[in-house]
Amino acid sequence: MAFTLPALPYALNALEPHIDARTMEIHHGKHHNAYVTNLNNAIAGKPEENLSIEEICKNISKYPAAVRNNGGGHYNHSLFWTVMAPHAGGAPKGAVADAIHAAFGNFEEFKTKFNAAAAGRFGSGWAWLVKSADGKLAITSTPNQDNPLMDVATAEIKGTPILGLDVWEHAYYLHYQNRRPDYCAAFWHVVNWSEVEKRFTAK
Ligand code: MN3
């Protein structure tokens, strides 16, 4: 088996009241698990079993839809769990805070723009904070399970995702129903800025 479901780095109820335990249980244990299973089925016996998920995403245009959807699903959710944490949120510090201020003016303006990208994504998809090749930050969104690593037109801004927010209904519907903006607002209470910083400063 090439890929495995990563364990959640905290308990299912650790992000409450912002993200409820039942949503986390189904989202991680069912949805993410299905992406891993379906990705493994799609690449079984092929050289892609020996590639990293990042390498697969960067060349995703070469692959069939099953690899794009499930490979993207695996990469995106693996990132998502780590950029959240209990007793987190607040404002970023350090190099990533400096880069956010440089790109967006201030933290409040950054959050407004990120929330607009998340709320404005029609249907299912993701909002992203991306580090581009020149080291600058940008906000973008992608449909379905696409992401900014992918060499596809739907990744309008390409680069390394350092923060991502899942805006598929399965990510919030049990607790927030149709109120996606409320879910987006709650997300800021659980953002793990030390992980975002780690991803920002990684070579
Ligand atoms: Mn999801």
Image (cartoon, rainbow, N blue to C red):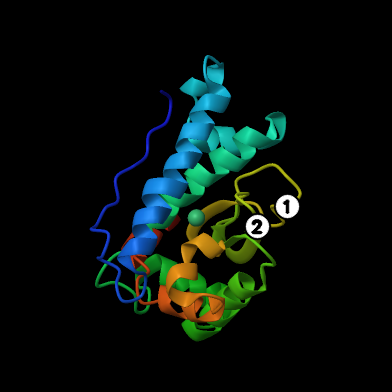
Ligand 1 is within 8 Å of the C-beta of the residue at disc 1: no
Hey, which residue is sitting farthest right in the picture?
153
**Can residue 169 be seen here?**
yes
**Residue bearing the label numbered 2:** 142
Total tally of numbered discs in the picture: 2
* Rendering coords of residue 197 (x, y %): 38, 61
Q: Classify mark 2: helix, strand or loop.
A: strand
Say if 148 sits above or below 192 in the image.
above
Q: Which residue matches tag 1?
A: 154
Seen from the viewer's position, the closer of residues 42 and 185 is 42
Name which residue type carries label 1.
Thr
Residue 114 on image: x %, y %: 57, 73
Query: Badge 1 local density, few (<14 within 10 Å), some, or many (20+)?
Result: some
> Does the residue at mark 1 contact the one at mark 2 (Cβ under 8 Å)?
yes
- For disc 2, the neighbor class at 10 Å (few under 14, some 14 to 19, many from 20) is many
Amino acid type, callout 2: Thr
- The C terminus: image quadrant: top left
Report which quarter residue 67 is drawn in. Answer: top right
Q: Is residue 198 left or right of residue 171?
A: left
Query: Residue lying farthest top?
Result: 45
Q: Quadrant of residue 7?
A: top left
Q: Residue at x 56, y 44 (%)?
A: 72
Q: Is residue 125 above or below residue 146?
A: below
Q: Earlier in the sequence, mark 1 or mark 2?
A: 2
Q: Residue at x 34, y 65 (%)?
A: 192
Instruction: Please report the residue visible at 52 percent of the width from the left and 19 percent of the height from the top.
Output: 44
Image quadrant where one finds the N terminus: top left
